[in-house]
Image (cartoon, rainbow, N blue to C red):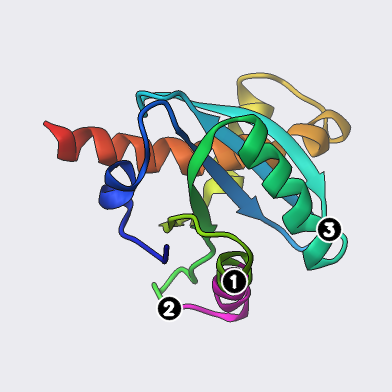
Amino acid sequence: MAIVDVNQLPHHLKRGERLLGLDLGSKTIGLAISDSSFHIASPLETIRRTKFTADAVALEKIIAERQVGGLVLGLPMNMDGTEGPRAQSTRQFAANLLARRDIPIAFWDERLSTMAVERVLIEEADMSRAKRGGVVDKMAASYILQGALDLIATQAR
């Protein structure tokens, strides 16, 4: 497979497969999973990053266990719409993953996703900084994946 447009992801999946959303950070990878009808994204877990091979093995295990057929990676764009070093790092992570596994991958502009999630956790959930640290990455992944699912839903109409 290769990098595909978000709208094309469902066409690359087998019946019953789901999408996995990733929020790639320098220290962690937040994960979220879709339902098989591509309507709802749910926070899944956070992987503590080590080396790429260990990160890829952890992802491959989740992909197999959760019937994942495609990935949505948050792409950290600059506010002016350009790509900086973090976006390049995300693209390289995707290329490295594709070298190991044949799976469709789409990118989703993740600008402000972590800030939006933090705001919800502070204002609506009244969560302390310590508690937020444990959930913000997987919540950001869910926010990213839900944005992609919402676009897929509008294209299906």
In the picture provided, is 148 more to the left or to the right than 58? left
Q: Amino acid at mark 1?
A: Ala
- Against 28, residue 147 (above or below) is above
**Mark 2 or 3 closer to N-term?**
3
Few, some or many residues within 10 Å of mark 2 (<14, 14–19, 20+): few
Q: Which residues are magenta?
A: 83-93
The CA distance from mark 1 to mark 2 is: 26 Å
Q: Vertically, is 8 above or below 92?
A: above
Residue on which the image places disc 1: 99
The C terminus lies in which quarter of the figure? top left
Which amino acid, by three-letter code, is at mark 2? Thr
In primary-sequence order, the first of circles 1 and 2 is: 2
Residue 54 numbered tag: 3
Image spot of residue 15 (x, y percent): 35, 29
Report the side of 112 relative to 16 (left or right). Answer: right
Answer few, some or many: residues within 10 Å of disc 3's Cα (few below 14, many 20 plus, some between 14 and 19): few
The answer for how far apart the CA atoms under marks 3 and 1 are is: 15 Å
Give the camera-side residue of 75 and 63. 63
Which comes before the other along the chain, label 3 or label 1? 3
Q: Which mark is residue 82?
A: 2
Is 2 placed above or below 111 here? below
**CA separation, marks 2 and 3?**
30 Å
Which of the image's four quarters has the N terminus?
bottom left
Going by the image, does 13 lie left or right of 50?
Answer: left
Q: From the viewer's perspective, is the residue at label 2 or at label 3 nearer? A: 3
Tag 2 secondary structure: loop
Can residue 90 be seen at all in this image of the molecule? yes
Q: Is residue 118 visible?
A: no
Q: Name the residue: 59% across, 68% down.
A: 90
Q: Residue at x 45, y 23 (%)?
A: 35
Secondary structure state at the residue bearing disc 1: helix
